[in-house]
Amino acid sequence: MLSVVMAAYNEAAMLQATVHEVVDGLRSSGRPFELRIVENGSTDGTRTIAERLAGEIDEVRVHSMRAANYGEALRTGLLEATGDVAVIFDVDCYDLDFLKEALAALDAAPELTGPAIPTGPIPTGTVMVVGSKRAPGARDERPWLRRIATGTFAWILRWGFSLSVSDTHGMKVLLREPLDPMVRRCRFGADLFDTELILRAERAGFRVAEVPVTVSERRPPRTSVLRRVPRTLLGLLRLRLALAREGT
C-alpha cells in the first residue's frame, strides 16, 4: 500500500483541489493507498478543510500540530503511515507521473533483506527516489533567486557532506521499513528534515536514486530566500556537528 504524506500550512486556497486530484489519480492506478494530511500551525481554514475532506474521502487521514514546522510534519506523517511505500508530496508540488517512475525504480531495485539497521554487511538496493530539480533533464521554472539558492545548497551538500544526489527538497518515494529507524533519528525539522533523512540513508549504506522533474511555483513561497538562507546555513552547521558526534 502507498502512504502519501502531505504537510499543510495555511493551504486553504489549494488543499481541496490538490487532494481531489491526487486521490483521483491514485484511485485510477488501482493500487491501495492512504493520504495523510499533516496540518501544522495553520491560521486560516486549512484544518477545517482537511477534516472535511477526511470525512468525505475514505482514504484521507488528518493529523494536526500546534506549531508550524514542515520537517516535523513530514516526520509525523511518515511515522503514522501504514503503507510499505511512502510518498512525500507538497500541496503545491506533486506529480503523479513522477510517482509512477519512482515506483518503477523501486520495483527494479534489488530486494532488501535483513534487519533495518544491519549488524553485518549492509544490504544493497534503492530505498528512496528523489524528484530532482537539478538532475539532467529537469526543468526548474522558479524565479532565478530561488534557483541560485537551490544550486548553492546542493553544492554545499555535495562538497561538505559528500551527498550523491543533486537535490534533497521536494517530492520523494521511499521504502518505509528500512528507513523507519532513520526517520525516528531525524531531529532537524523545518528546512532540513529531508536533507537529514537522505544523509542518514546514504551514510547507512543505502542507495538514494533521483529522477528529473519539472517544478514551477503554484503560489508564492512561504518564506523569502533572504530570510531562509541564513537559517538554513546555520542549520547545516548544526547538522554537521550532530552527525559528527554520532559518528555517522
Image (cartoon, rainbow, N blue to C red):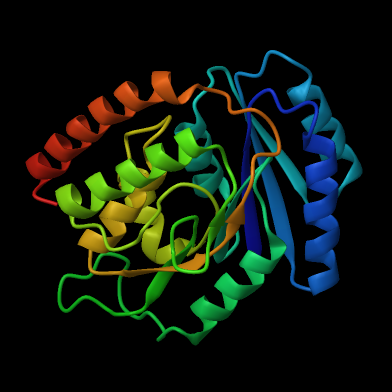
Q: Residue at x 31, y 77 (%)?
A: 114
Q: Is residue 248 left or right of residue 3?
A: left
Residue 10 lies, with reference to residue 30, above or below; the image says above
Residue 39 lies, with reference to residue 148, above or below; the image says above
Q: Quadrant of the N terminus?
A: bottom right
Q: Residue furthest top?
A: 43
Where residue 34 sits, quadrant-wise, is bottom right
Provide residue 217's location: percent of width, then percent of height: 65, 39
Q: Residue at x 81, y 62 (%)?
A: 25
How many numbered discs, if any? Answer: 0
Q: Residue furthest right?
A: 56
Q: Is residue 130 left or right of residue 55?
A: left
Residue 188 lies, with reference to residue 36, above or below; the image says above
Front-most of residues 160 and 62: 160
Residue 106 lies, with reference to residue 96, above or below; the image says below
Provide residue 90's location: percent of width, then percent of height: 62, 43
Q: Residue at x 26, y 64 (%)?
A: 117
Provide residue 33's location: percent of width, then percent of height: 72, 61
Q: Is residue 143 left or right of residue 204?
A: right
Q: Residue at x 67, y 45 (%)?
A: 36
Front-most of residues 78 and 217: 217
Provide residue 101's location: percent of width, then percent of height: 60, 74
Front-most of residues 145 and 128: 145
